[in-house]
């Protein structure tokens, strides 16, 4: 009887193995041709007033529809929308991008540019309707850090798309700086620290670490981080704070703050007019 049981176990094992071999789980997907493929997002940083009149309600790449009014490209925003790290894909090479803005019933062709798309992942930043986009590499892999206990790091990439007034990009090299609350009980602040190196118009830092000192111990971890911008001279010297027009029409030192969550990775894009309206401000987007 023992021998019969052993034989039955052998047959059962063979049957289960064969079943596993025959029922391989597969997912239908097209392989990504890395050598001839571009993944991209489109950022709309043209210095314009927000509102329906300036929203992009039709986007075409090489004559094919990318998005329409169901998922518009609003001013100071980006597409594809709705999820972090979501991209359009196309074959690398020369492409044509068209943006149509305004009400759906009366769309106007606002942008029609040919440019080269290299292989890789890029943020296409539209800052002037008469110029090709600035291509910012979307760096991968994302930075990480390993800790024994709770982490304290988020990452920020600062991009400079500041205009002085209409048609005049800033000629200032800008150093983005951050400061965090060291002690939540006393509200003691850290010294100011640089977010990467100074950047000229159309340039970006890398993914730069900032410290998140969360206020609630048992939580995912979110905290306020303060930011300022310094103007850097041709000789590398600090020329003082960036002075911008505020909503009241006064010229003031730029300052702002944003919450950051531990482990998250953010874009901070400076856009708008420094000395006119619409006024300049930093728009943030979560990359991860």
Image (cartoon, helix red, strand yellow):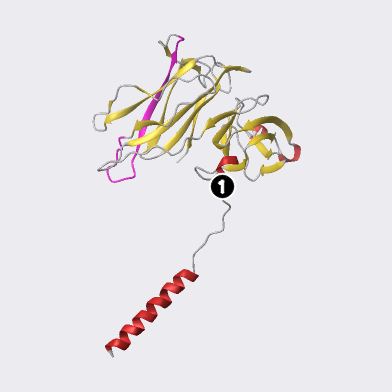
Q: In the image, residue 148 lies at what x, y percent?
A: 25, 43
The reply to whether the magenta stretch includes residue 169 is no
Quarter placement of the N terminus: bottom left
In the rendered image, the vertical position of residue 170 relative to residue 148, given as above or below? above
List x then y, in percent, for residue 6. Answer: 31, 83
* Residue 225 on the magenta span: yes
Q: Give the range drawn in magenta.
A: 213-234
- The residue under the point 31% across, 45% down is 219
Residue 64 is situated, as x and y percent measured from the top left of the image, at: 70, 43
State the image quarter where residue 3 is shown: bottom left
Q: Name the residue under label 1.
A: 32
Q: Residue furthest bottom?
A: 1
Q: Which of 158 and 240 is in front in this view?
A: 158
Q: Is residue 163 above or below residue 147?
A: above
Relative to 224, 120 lies left or right: right
Please indicate, yes or no, whether residue 37 appears anywhere in the rendered image.
Answer: no
Q: What element carries label 1?
A: loop
Horizontal side of 124 relative to 13 (left or right) equals: right
Question: Compared to 282, does 154 lie above or below?
Answer: below
Q: Identify the image quadrant of residue 221.
A: top left
Residue 119 located left or right of residue 59: left
Res. 143 in view: yes
Q: In this view, does 183 lie to the left or right of 227?
A: left
Tag count = 1
Which quadrant is home to the C terminus?
top left
């Amino acid at each position: 009887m023992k021998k019969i049981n052993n034989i039955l176990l052998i047959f059962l094992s063979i049957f289960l193995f064969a079943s596993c071999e025959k029922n391989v789980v597969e997912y239908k997907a097209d392989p990504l041709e890395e050598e001839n493929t571009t993944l991209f997002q489109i950022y709309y940083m043209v210095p314009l007033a927000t509102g329906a009149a300036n929203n992009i309600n039709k986007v075409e790449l090489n004559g094919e529809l990318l998005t329409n009014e169901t998922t518009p490209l609003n001013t100071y925003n980006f597409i594809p929308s709705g999820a972090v790290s979501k991209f359009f894909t196309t074959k690398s090479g020369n492409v044509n991008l068209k943006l149509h803005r305004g009400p759906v019933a009366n769309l106007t062709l606002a942008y029609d540019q040919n440019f080269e798309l290299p292989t890789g992942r890029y943020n296409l930043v539209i800052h002037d309707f008469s110029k090709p986009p600035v291509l910012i590499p979307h760096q991968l892999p994302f930075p990480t850090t390993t800790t024994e206990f709770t982490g304290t790091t988020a990452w920020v990439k600062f991009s400079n798309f500041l205009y002085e007034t209409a048609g005049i990009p800033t000629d200032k090299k800008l150093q983005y700086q951050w400061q965090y609350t060291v002690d939540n009980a006393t509200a003691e602040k850290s010294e100011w620290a640089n977010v990467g190196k100074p950047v000229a118009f159309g340039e970006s830092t890398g993914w730069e670490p900032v410290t998140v000192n969360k206020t609630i111990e048992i939580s995912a971890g979110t905290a306020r981080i303060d930011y300022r911008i310094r103007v850097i001279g041709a000789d590398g010297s600090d020329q003082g704070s960036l002075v911008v027009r505020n909503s009241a029409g006064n010229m003031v030192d730029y300052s702002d703050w944003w919450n950051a969550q531990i482990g998250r990775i953010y874009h901070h894009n400076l856009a708008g007019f420094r000395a006119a309206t619409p006024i300049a401000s930093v728009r943030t987007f979560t990359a991860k």
